[in-house]
Amino acid sequence: MTPPAIPRRPWFSPRSLAILAGALILCFGAARLGAIATFPNLEPWYRGLEKPWFTPPDVAFPVAWTILFALMAVAVWRVALLSDGATRRGALGAFAVQLALNVGWSFAFFAAQSPLLGLIEIAALLAAIVWTIARFRPIDGVAAALLCPYLAWVAFAAALNAAILVLNA
C-alpha cells in the first residue's frame, strides 16, 4: 500500500515569493518606524540615563533587531502560506497586534522619553508575542519556533526597561 502523498509546499512559487517580499517589507517597515522614534532620542536623553550592568553594547541592538525582524518575516510568511480562512486571519491578526505594539514601544520609551510608558507597552508586547506564538503553533511549528528568540529578546528588553525605570526614578 502506498502512503498518502504529502502535499507540496510551493515555497518558491511566484505567489510564495510575493508573500515573502510583503512580509519582509512589513517587518522591516515596522523596524524603520521604530528607528524613527529611537534615533533622535539617543543623544542626549538615552545616553544620559543610568543603565544596569547587563546593558549590552549599543552595537548589539541593531544586529539583534535585524535578525529578529528577519525571523518574524519568515515566520509570518510560512503562516500566510500554510493557512487559510479564519485560521490565517486569526494568526495574522495576532501578528499585526504584536508588530504594532513593537513599534509602539519605541515611541513610548524613546519618543516620549518615558521608561514607565515603555514598561507598560512592553508588558503588552510580551503578552501579544506569546499569543502570536500560540496562534502560529497549530499552523506551523517552525513559524512558532522562529518567534521564540524574539520572545526571549523582548523579555530581556523588558528587564532592561524595568531596571532603567528603577535606576532613573
Image: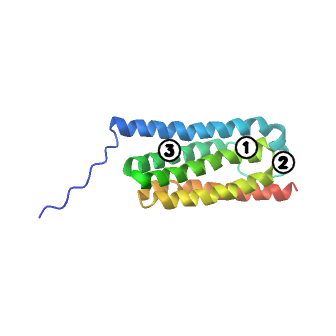
Q: Amino acid at mark 1?
A: Phe
| 2 and 1 marks in contact (CB < 8 Å) | no
Q: Quadrant of residue 46?
A: top right
- Residue 152 image position (x, y, % from top left): 60, 58
Q: Is residue 42 above or below residue 159?
A: above
- Residue 112 image position (x, y, % from top left): 79, 44
Q: Earlier in the sequence, mark 2 or mark 1?
A: 2
Between the C-alphas of marks 3 and 1, the distance is 22 Å
Q: Is residue 52 visible?
A: no
Q: Which residue is mark 3?
A: 73
- Residue drawn 72% across the image and 38% down it: 37
Q: Residues within 10 Å of mark 3 (few under 14, many from 20)?
A: many
Nearer to me, 41 or 30? 30
**In the drawing, does residue 15 fall left or right of residue 149?**
left
Between the C-alphas of marks 3 and 2, the distance is 32 Å
Label of residue 49 in the image = 2
Q: Amino acid at mark 3?
A: Ala
**In the drawing, does residue 130 fall left or right of residue 37?**
left
Q: Quadrant of the N terminus?
A: bottom left
Label of residue 107 in the image = 1
Q: Helix or strand or loop: what does disc 3 sit on? A: helix
Q: Helix or strand or loop: what does disc 1 sit on? A: helix
Q: Hey, which residue is sitting farthest bottom in the picture?
A: 1
